[in-house]
Amino acid sequence: MFKVNKLTDYAMVLLLEMARGSTVRSTQHVSDRTGIPLPTVAKIMKSLGKAGLVQSQRGAGGGYALGRRPIEITVADVIQAVEGPIALTACAETSDEHCSIEAVCPVQGKWNRVNRAVRAALTEVTLADMAEDIPTFGPAPRAKEEPRAATALLAPVK
Amino acid sequence: MFKVNKLTDYAMVLLLEMARGSTVRSTQHVSDRTGIPLPTVAKIMKSLGKAGLVQSQRGAGGGYALGRRPIEITVADVIQAVEGPIALTACAETSDEHCSIEAVCPVQGKWNRVNRAVRAALTEVTLADMAEDIPTFGPAPRAKEEPRAATALLAPVK
DNA sequence: GCAAAGCGGACTAAAACAGTCCTGTTTACG
DNA sequence: CGTAAACAGGACTGTTTTAGTCCGCTTTGC
């Protein structure tokens, strides 16, 4: 199945939680709120931080806040932050990889049109769009409970 | 990296080769022409056959031909034939899978918009588009040589 | 009847992914 | 100025997915 990583899905949930305010929140807090395990939240936050999607504040009382406004964060941004470049085939424009027969490749560049179309589609939708009609994440959970992931924590596959 | 399967890429190469004529060709022949290993060609052809993208002729002298005109075969068709439904997240519209917290899922349905946009982008481009400016696949190779895959047979990853 | 060619499915090796953990650095605060 | 909170970076591991192969069966032309 043509799909995004589970971590990308988690990332969207985390960003949605972050979008609920502009205050700095610790990974611990976000983990509690979303049910996503602490180490996993930390890992994803690092990726999001490198991409500038979230800003970090180190030290005691530190944590993360959104790096820019929800309307300025696209689905494409999130995917790229977590998974790397969006390149449907390995030797596409945005990829650093190269096809061993690039010089004579009969389909050279043909995928780029598809790539651009997909990137455009993913750039259309922003975090703000995803957050619509989700004014709250539900009452703040205080104890451990099921992750409030988007599609995360699937029923056992198949 | 957000990408399609290697097999999907191979499939495109196979279809492109098939698009060069309407005659029935054996997997052996197509394997020789493209450099993709015989068992792999066979496997992909089975998937394409089930999806109706190619038609098969069993028995001696049999083989495969395109199931419909190149302009009627989209990239989305190929991806779906090889990888299954295009559903960026597991619990999306076209997926049979279900999220364990579907009833209360805060992002329920939000991904569908993204899904539809991506599907539309992938439906825009047809085999005929990909085949443009590739009148021949080069002189018919008669001995083993490098696969003439699109992006297949990459340089060692990374 | 025999050989060519596709069909269906099982199996294996390799790669990618998800998840965890550890060690170091930065910062608030008593 | 010492301690604890919190992020940074990266190594490591078990699991899942993917790619590739193989085998026995069926269909069909000659």
Image (cartoon, coloured by chain):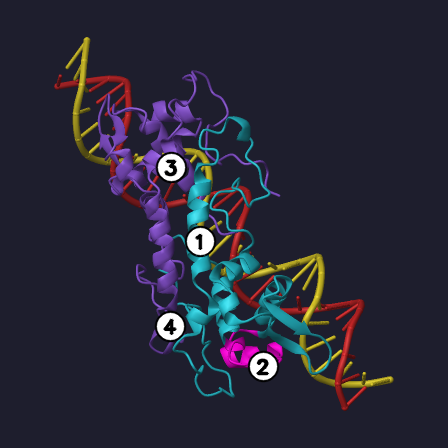
Chain colours: A purple, B cyan, C yellow, D red
User: Dots 4 and 2: beta carbons under 8 Å?
Assistant: no
At 62% from the left and 79% from the top, the residue drawn is B26
Circle 3 residue: A11
Gap between marks 1 and 4 measured at Cα: 31 Å
Q: Residues within 10 Å of mark 2 (few under 14, many from 20)?
A: some
Circle 2 residue: B29
Q: Chain of mark 4?
A: A
User: Dots 1 and 2: beta carbons under 8 Å?
Assistant: no
Dot 1 amino acid type:
Ala
Q: Nearer the viewer, mark 4 or mark 3?
A: 3
Residue range (magenta): B17-37
Q: Quadrant of the C terminus of chain A?
A: top right
At 28% from the left and 36% from the top, the residue drawn is A71
Does the magenta run of residues contain B83? Answer: no
Image: A101 above or below A38: below
Image: B44 above or below B33: above
Q: Residues within 10 Å of mark 1 (few under 14, many from 20)?
A: some
Is there one chain holding both mark 1 and mark 4? no
Gap between marks 1 and 2 measured at Cα: 34 Å
Circle 4 residue: A100
The circle drawn on residue B120 is: 1
Is there one chain holding both mark 1 and mark 3? no
Dot 2 amino acid type:
His
**Mark 2: which secondary structure?**
helix
Dot 3 amino acid type:
Ala
At 59% from the left and 65% from the top, the residue drawn is B48
Task: Using the rendered image of the protein, determine whether residue B123 is visible from the camera's viewpoint.
Answer: yes
